[in-house]
Amino acid sequence: MPWGEFKDTAAERRLFQRRTVVMLVFVVLAVGGLLARMYQLQVVEHEVYTTLSDKNRVQVQSVPPPRGLVYDRNDALLAENRPVFSVTLVPERVRGMDDTLGQLGTILDISEEDRERFQRRLQEPRRPFQEIPLRYDLDEQEMARLAVHRHELPGVEVKAELVRFYPHSELTAHALGFVGRINRDELQRIDPVNYAGTNYIGKSGIERFYEEVLHGHVGYQHVETNARGRTLRVLERENPTPGEDLQLHLDLRLQQRAHELLSGRRGAIIAIEPATGGILALASVPGFDANKFVTGIGVSDYRELSSSLDKPLFNRALRGQYPPGSTVKPMLAVAALDSGATTRDYTMWDPGHFRLKEGGRVWRDWKRTGHGWVDLMDAVAESCDVYFYEIAVEMGVDTMYSYLAHFGFGEDATLDVSGALSGLLPSRDWKRAVRNEPWYPGDSVNMGIGQGFMLATPLQLATATALIANRGRWVEPRLLKDIKGDRPVEEFLPAETHEPLTLKNPEDWEYVVDTMVEVMHGAKGTARSAGRGAPYKMAGKTGTAQVFSLAEDEEYNEEEIRERLRDHALFVGFAPADNPQIAVAVIVENGGSGSGTAAPVARALFDSWLLEYGQADGALVSDIEAQVAD
Amino acid sequence: MAFKALLDSTASNPLGRQRSIWTALHLDPILLLLLILLVSGGLFVLYSGADRNLEVVKAQGIRLGVAFVVMLVFAQLDPSVFRRWAPWLYAVGIVALVAVMLVGVGAKGAQRWLAIPGLPRFQPSELMKLVVPMMAAWYLSRHFLPPRLRHVAVGLAIVLVPMVMIMQQPDLGTSLLVGLAGIFVVFFAGISWKLIAAFVAMVSVSAPLMWFFVMREYQKQRVLTLLDPQSDPLGAGWNIIQSKTAIGSGGIDGKGWLQGTQSHLEFLPESHTDFIVAVLAEEFGFVGMLILMAVYFLIILRCLYIAATAQDSFSRLLAGALTMTFFIYIFVNVGMVSGLLPVVGVPLPLISYGGTSGVTLMAAFGVLMSIHTHRRMIGA
C-alpha cells in the first residue's frame, strides 16, 4: 500500500460484499419494477394500446364514386371521366411550405397561376388533412422526376383522379353545363359524408340539375398508412356506387349542324321534338371549352372569355332575352281567333301605318306602302304589322297576357333545364309595379308585334312553337331522355305541370298552322325562299327584333349602323307541318332580317333532321316523299 | 443450482493447478456466452428496428466486432495497469474535455466531439465513463475503507468535475452515466449510510434549484412531457406515446419478428437507436422482454460475482461500479422508453445502433474479465 499502512483486507472485502448484496437487491427491485411496468403496458393495458396502434396505422378513406356519364340520344358520349394525375399537398404534413413549393418548382413546371390558385385554396376553409391540388395533368416525365424526389417532400402526393372531360368541348358546353371544383358556398350545401372524397360538383346545366343522380354514393376503404400518411395497402373496401349514366334527347349531329349554321355569328338555336318535349339541339354560339373550367380556369383565360364582346360564356338559348318580334304573331293569331278579336273572314285595309286615334302617334308597318287588303292568313304570311296592331288593341293587354302566358311566356316552363330564364311577359300589374305607370293602349300596339316590353328566350319561343305544332298539347322542354340504370326516367324528371291549351274551336289550330305553312310555301310568304324546294311541308314565322327603337319618321340604313346595332334575325317553326317532328327557334344576333338570315338556318336544320338524322329506319323520309308525290 | 454453476464454472478451479484455456486467454466464458447471446439477439431486433436495412446490421456487426477486440485487449491487461494508468488517463480525459469546450465539433447545438487530425473523431465524454470510476477507485483504494469524509469529498470532486463539464456540452445522458459510475465507486467503497442519507437529502433540496438554474429548456420539456405526454401529442410527447403504444400493443407474445406496425410504419421514432427496446417489446411481447431482462440480469449477476471475488479493493470498486453503470444504462433506457423516466439519450446497451457506447461497454467487460482472470493464488 502506498502509505505503508496496514489494511484490513478481509474487513474491506466483507464491507464490499455487503454493499454488493445491497446493489443486487437494488438491481432485483429495479428489474422487477421494469418488468412490472412492462406487464402493466403489455398485459393489463394491452387492449388500450392495441386500439391506439390500430388507430395509428389504419385510416378510413372515402372513395369517391365515378361520376355518371352522359350520352346523346344515339349513345354518343358527351361527358366522360378521364384519369388525371395531379400533385397535391397536405399542408398538415408538409415540412416548410415555402421550401417545399420552391423545390417542387424546380422539379415541375408550376405557373404563377397555379401558385396563386394554390395559395387561394390554402386560405379557404377545408377539411383537415384534405389535400390541396397544386398542378394538374402531369405528364410522364414530370411524374418520373417527382417520383425520384418524393421521399424528400413529405406531404406531397401524386394523385390520380377521374376528372370530367367533355370530348366535344365547345359544342356541348351550353347544352350540358360543366362541373368544377366545389367552392365555399357549395361546401355549406353538400352532404359532407357523401362528398367526402369528391372534389367536383355540377356548376351549370344538366351537370348541376342532375348532380345528385350523376354523383353516386361514396364508398370507403380502410387503408394502412405509415406515420407520414402514405398509404401502404388496402385492408378492406366498400365500393362506391357510381353515379347514374344519363341519356339525353340531344342529338350530337344536329347539335353540330346547329353550331355550323351559326358559325361566325352570334346566336342561338333550340330544337325540340314536339312529341316528347325533348331538346334535340341547344346551341349558343360562340361557345367555350368547358374542360377549361373543370380543374379551374386560369385568370387570364377567364378574363379573355368574360370580357369578349361576343360573350361566349353567355347562354343565349336559355338566358338570352330578346324582343320576340313577329315570331309572336302565330301565338297572337291563336289568341285573337279564340278570344273573338278577329275571325278567319275578317279583312282590313293596311295603308302602311296605324293610328290609335285621328292625328295620334303613327305606328309603321315594316312595308311602308302597306299590304292592302289582308285577312289573318295574309297577315301572318306577309307579317303584316298593321293587322296585328289592330287585333292587339282589340284584345287588350289582359287577353294577350292570358294567352301568351298559356304559351309559356313569362315563366321558366322547363323540367330540367338549369338556368333557363323567364323572359318578360308584360301586364298591367307589371307595368304598375315596375314603372308605376298605367298600361297605355300604345303599349298593346307594340306588344302586337312582339316589341315594347315583351322579352322571350329562344327556348321559350321554341316551346311556344312546339305547342302550336302539338295543337295545344303541352310538352315541357326537357333534356333527360333516359337513365341508363334500371330505374325509370320518370323518377328523375320533375312532374309536368302545364294544362293543354284548349281552343273553343280546335280547328283554329289547323288554321294557324296553315298561316305558318303559308309563310314558308305561300306566294307572298316572308320565308318562301327558305321553304322553296322542300320535299316536306313546314310551318314557320320570321321575326326581326329591333336592337334599339327608331323615332317614327327616322329612316335608317343598315350599312350606316354599326354591325352590332343591326336588328336581330329570328325564326320559329316546325316540320313537317302535319306530323311535326321538330320545332325550332333561331336567333341570329344582328343578323338583319328573319327571313333572310334566320329562316334559312331553320330550313337547313329541318333538312338535316328530317332527311338525314331524324329517323334511323328512313320511314319518315319515304313518308314525306309519298306526301310530295300526292 | 444453475446460479451456482453460473457463478462457479471457471471459479471451480481458477486457482488449481490446471489453468483452463479461458484463463489463459483471460476470458470469462460465462460472461462471454451471455454477451454473445445478447449481441446476436440484439442484431435480429436491430434488423427489424432498422426496417430490414441490412446495411445497418452490417455496420453494427462491424462495430461490435471492433468492440469485442477492444474487450479482448483490455482483458489481457493486468488490473494493476489500469490502476497505475488511472491518474494519467484522468488527466488526459480532463484536458480532452476542456478541448471539446474550446474547439469541439458537434451537431444539434451540442458540442461533444473532438476532431484531432490524424485520429478518428472521438467523444472524450465516452472515455470518461471508464476513466472516472478508475480514477475514483484508484484514489479511494489508496486509503482505509470505509473512507473518511475528506476522502469521500475528494472522491466526489473527482467525479463531479468531469460530470459538470459533460453536462455543459450539453449531454445529460452521458454526464449522468459518468457521474453515477463515480458515485457507485464511492458507494462500494463503503461510504456510511448517514452520509448517503445526507446526500439524498441534499439532492432533493437542490432539485428545484437544478430545475431553475441548471436544466436547459429542452431538458425541462422532457420532464414535463413525461408527466403529461398528451399535452403535446405531436411534438415532444410523440415519442413517449408512440413507444408506449408499441410496447402495449405487443401484448404477451408480440406481433412477431418484422411484424411490428409501430416501428415498420414509422410511427415509432428512433426505432433502431434509443427506442429499440420498444421494437423488441412490440414484436416479441412480454415474453421477449422477460428473456431480455433475464439475459441482462444474468450478466449483472455474473459481473457482481466477479466484483465480489476480486482480490484487491481497486479491482472490486472498479468492477462493481462498471457493473452498476451497465445496469443504469438498461434501467434508464427501458424506463425512458416505457414512460417511467424522462427522455434522456441513453442507448439500450449492446443492442441500440450506435458506435462509441458499445465500444466503451465492451471495454468495461474487458476490464471485468481482466480482473477475473488475473487473480493470483494467495496463501499458497
Image (cartoon, grey):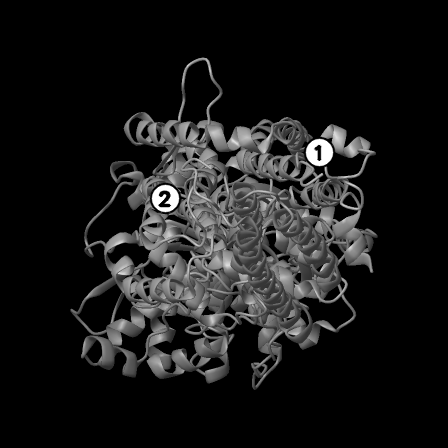
Of residue A432 and residue B26, the one placed in the foreground of this image is: B26
The Cα atoms of the two marked residues, 2 and 1, are separated by 37 Å
Image position, residue A166 (x, y; %): 60, 46
The label on residue A396 is none
Above or below B152: residue A98: above
Which residue is under mark 1?
A: B54
Per the image, label 1 sits on a secondary structure element best described as helix
Q: Outermost residue toward the bottom?
A: A504
Task: Give the side of residue A398 with respect to residue A238, left or right.
Answer: left
Tell me the amino acid under the disc marked 2: Met
Of residue A416 and residue A461, the one placed in the foreground of this image is: A416
Q: Count the marks.
A: 2
**Residue A61 occupies quadrant:** bottom right
Image position, residue A537 (x, y; %): 66, 56
Per the image, label 2 sits on a secondary structure element best described as helix
Image position, residue A538 (x, y; %): 62, 56
Q: The disc numbered 1 marks a residue on which chain?
A: B
Q: Residue at x 53, y 72 (%)?
A: A191
Q: Residue at x 39, y 45 (%)?
A: A117
Asked if both marks, 2 and 1, belong to the same chain, the answer given is: yes
Above or below A177: residue A339: below
User: Would you say residue A592 is visible in this rendering?
Assistant: no
The label on residue B163 is 2
User: Would you say residue A75 is visible in this rendering?
Assistant: yes
